[in-house]
Image: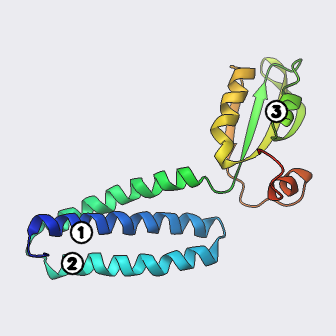
Amino acid sequence: MLENSFIMVAIILIINIVYVSFFTIRMILTLKGQRYLAASLSMIEVVIYVLGLGLVLNNLNHIQNLVAYAVGYGVGVIVGMKIEEKLALGYITVNVITGESDKDLPKLLREKGYGVTDWSAHGLEGNRMAMQILTPRKFELKLYETIKTLDPRAFIISYEPKSIHGGFWVKSVKRGKLFS
């Protein structure tokens, strides 16, 4: 079966896509502090890696195998990133600055389940309202849509917090009480 060069190329391509996807997800899990899950995934990942690399090294006289390995690597990065996007692990913090200080944006966002801290601010064009909003990453796009609907001119900056401690909102999310 492995004598057919088309089948060999397809196998190498698929093996590398799977390997690099696992690699990408493992790195993300490591960064998110999921060490045992990342370690478990790495055991599967290394077996796949050795199989794919072994096929290429045993058949270096066929350039198409090396090309399949490289293409599989690139496609695997994209596939791994897409999988991570769907998993959307962790939280995101969104800072919003709005000129709509007369609207009750913080209250509306809290009613939707977001953790919001707000304060008065002053910008180049006058008084503003600043908000810091915490949400699970899987609700990030929905939060952006909500903010843009409530204030299309809002200034939005987001980042991923490294660690979160305390507060009623985090406890509620961990108990599954929000966004149900």
> What label does residue 109 carry, if any?
3
Pointer 1 with pointer 3, Cβ within 8 A: no
Indicate the quadrant containing the C terminus: top left, top right, bottom left or bottom right: top right
Residue 13 found in image quarter:
bottom left
First of labels 3, 2 by sequence position = 2
Nearest the camera: 33 or 126? 33
The spot of residue 56 in percent (x, y) is: 20, 75
* Residue visible at 51% across and 64% down in the picture: 25
Q: Residues within 10 Å of mark 3 (few under 14, many from 20)?
A: some
> What label does residue 12 carry, if any?
1
Q: Amino acid at mark 3?
A: Leu
Circle 1 SS class = helix
First of labels 1, 3 by sequence position = 1
Q: Amino acid at mark 2?
A: Leu
Indicate the quadrant containing the N terminus: top left, top right, bottom left or bottom right: bottom left
Circle 3 SS class = helix
* Residue visible at 75% across and 38% down in the picture: 95
First of labels 2, 1 by sequence position = 1
> What label does residue 55 carry, if any?
2
